[in-house]
Amino acid sequence: MTKAVLLMGSPRGRKSTSNAVCIYLQEIFEKNGLESQDPIFIRNHVASEEKMNDMLVAIDQADIIVLVAPLYDDTSPAIVTKTMEVMAKNSSKYANKRFLPIINSGFPEPFHITEIAIPIYHKFATSLGLHWTGSLALGGGEAMRGRIGKLLNEGGGFGKKVMKALDRVVESFVTNSDFGDEALEIFSLKIYYNRVMRKFMIWINNRSWKKTAKKNGGQVDARPYST
Amino acid sequence: MGVLILNGDHKGHNKLTAIQEILEDELKEAGWDTETFILNEYNIKGCTGCFKCWDTTPGICTGIKGDDANKIVEKVIQNELLVFLTPLTFGGYSSELKAIIERMLGLLQPGQLIVDGESHHLKRYERYPSVLAFAVTDNLDKEEEVLFKKLLERHSRNFYPPMHKTEVFQTKENEETIRDRVNKCIQKINVGNKSG
Ligand SMILES: Cc1cc2nc3c(=O)[nH]c(=O)nc-3n(C[C@H](O)[C@H](O)[C@H](O)COP(=O)(O)O)c2cc1C
């Protein structure tokens, strides 16, 4: 039986868009006869060598490695980078395992993910001899509200779109074919109406941050450090 | 003029020590006040994505307590130049350097704006430091070098440095060559800062 490991790379943990993606993936792995365990929360494994080794063993035993993580500063979160560095020390172990990263961002444009982060993951994969089966960029994943614990089926139209793409990811695993590199966006900025709406949404969004900060006793544009 | 050097070497590796020392020498020579943090000697955790630095204590991370990140982040904004030193890691930053970069999130505001058709965050401060990013590698890989330059270019769009400059060095390069390359970067930054 083909074994898949889900590496959940969000430092947020359980309440994150990355975890919502993992939960759905685990469900469809099972339905499609792929063997997998609960997602491995990277943040729980990077602090100690012993825990890191546990994660490496799980990776070692898998045929397919799916990394699900947020975009942080145009690239991987530090905890994911740490995992990549440690894996690179044992690179001989990973030859031909299949690898696919699924990365979500705050900004809606998927190129924030595909410009640098995906090529860095690709470089990582090829350096370790992993088989790159493709990647999935989710532009605007934050808006699915994984941060407050929402699952993909509660993520509206975009959630549905993401689930469909994940179905195809799993199909590619089952049929032993490559998924390819895909990017989904929460709304297409190629459409004029959406570009106008985007401006309105930014206005609403900026107001909402201001209100929340005020409610919490702060001022959103405070400058606490003197310059 | 102040410069903050963030050395993202891995514990026990000392791959970046030579370049750090050359850089400090040359910057001092050029009239900069330098302060260096070898990050692996400090307790610095990566960002946990709680956004408290945006919506609860704007500008200050209060989501992670008791580590050394805040005092370094404060210095970032108070200096005119920020230097990243990192082992080249698949074309990106090391995990040590990446952790502190993540903690700089509060130096921006959560609100967004569109620049050249791209979403970016609003500035919190009027002025940000220029950025020099030096990566060191044993064997130069062109693809990784290009990625590193692009990463800095993208990152700069979100961080508003008046100037940024990237260089990739090889561990086998001799001291003179490194000194010469470092100097050229400092000159460019000096000129940029004066004109900017
Ligand atoms: C430290 C930090 C850096 C981030 N950098 C970016 C970025 O460069 N581009 C972007 O579009 N979103 C960025 N984000 C937003 C996250 O990608 C976004 O919140 C994502 O949905 C989080 O996913 P998760 O819930 O799976 O952790 C950043 C968030 C944090 C906390």
Image: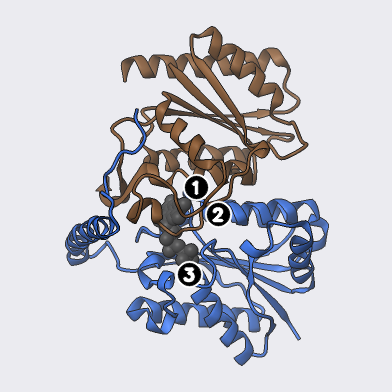
Residue visible at 28% across and 51% down in the picture: A218
Q: Give the amino acid type for the residue marked by disc 1 in the picture.
A: Glu
Question: Is the CB of mark 2 within 8 Å of ligand 1?
Answer: yes
Label 3 Cα crowd, 10 Å radius (few <14 / some 14-19 / many 20+): many
Marks 3 and 2, Cα distance to the nearest angstrom? 14 Å
- Colour in which chain B is drawn: brown
Marks 3 and 1, Cα distance to the nearest angstrom? 17 Å
Q: Secondary structure at mark 1?
A: helix
Query: Mark 2 or mark 3, which is nearer the start of the sequence?
Result: 3
Q: A178 and B91: which one is in front?
A: B91
Q: What residue is disc 2 on?
A: A77
Q: Secondary structure at mark 2?
A: loop
Mark on residue A16? 3
- Colour in which chain A is drawn: blue
Q: Position of residue B36 (x, y in %)?
A: 58, 26
Q: B126 and A163: which one is in front?
A: B126
Marks 1 and 2, Cα distance to the nearest angstrom? 8 Å
